[in-house]
Image (cartoon, helix red, strand yellow):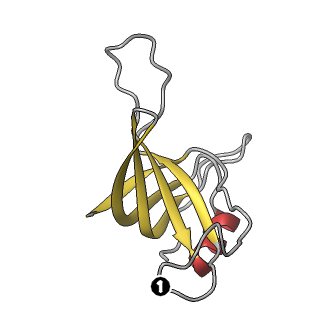
Amino acid sequence: MANISISGTVSAKPDTPPVTTTTYENPNGGPASVVSIVNVCDRQFVAAKNDNERLGQFYRCEFRGRLAEVVADRAKRGDKITVYGQLVQKMYQDKLQLNVTNCSVTFLESAPPANSGSGASDSLF
């Protein structure tokens, strides 16, 4: 696994599936931990009009424990964040899926409300 640092935009509200011992076991042993999954795009996503346009790369980032709770509460679509973790590449239905595990996060900028200006830089976790 390679270490990776991604600065990008949260593409959707974090997904926090219910915790069950069969769904998300703690990789360090012990009881199942809270998991929050966030999709991050490394550039402004624009729908391709032709094959020559480069789309943004999407990463599925997995947070665990207390950090998962913080990310689930704070992250929203359009927020700018930097994620640090380990890159895991998997093939899924003939497509490459990029997962980032063992994540930490820095919230760079909040998405502005629909009727106001820019957000502000915030805390490191």
Report crowding for label 1: few under 14, some 14 to 19, many 20 or more residues within 10 A (C-alpha).
few
Residue placed most toward the observer, 65 or 115: 65
Figure disc tally: 1
| SS under mark 1 | loop
Residue placed most toward the observer, 33 or 39: 33
Seen in the image, is 42 located left or right of residue 52? right
Residue placed most toward the observer, 40 or 78: 40
Residue placed most toward the observer, 67 or 17: 17
In the displayed structure, would residue 114 be above or below residue 54?
below
The residue sitting at 61% across, 80% down in the picture is 66
**Residue reaching furthest to the top:** 50
In which quadrant will I find the N terminus? bottom left
Can residue 34 be seen? yes
Dot 1 corresponds to which residue?
Answer: 28
Image quadrant assignment for residue 50: top left
Can residue 122 be seen? no
The residue sitting at 72% across, 40% down in the picture is 114
Q: Position of residue 104 (x, y in %)?
A: 45, 71
Q: Position of residue 36 (x, y in %)?
A: 61, 64
Seen in the image, is 115 located left or right of residue 82? right
**Residue reaching furthest to the front:** 22
The residue sitting at 57% across, 52% down in the picture is 79
**Residue reaching furthest to the left:** 2
Q: Amino acid at mark 1?
A: Asn
Q: Position of residue 123 (x, y in %)?
A: 52, 74
Image quadrant assignment for residue 3: bottom left
The residue sitting at 70% across, 67% down in the picture is 73
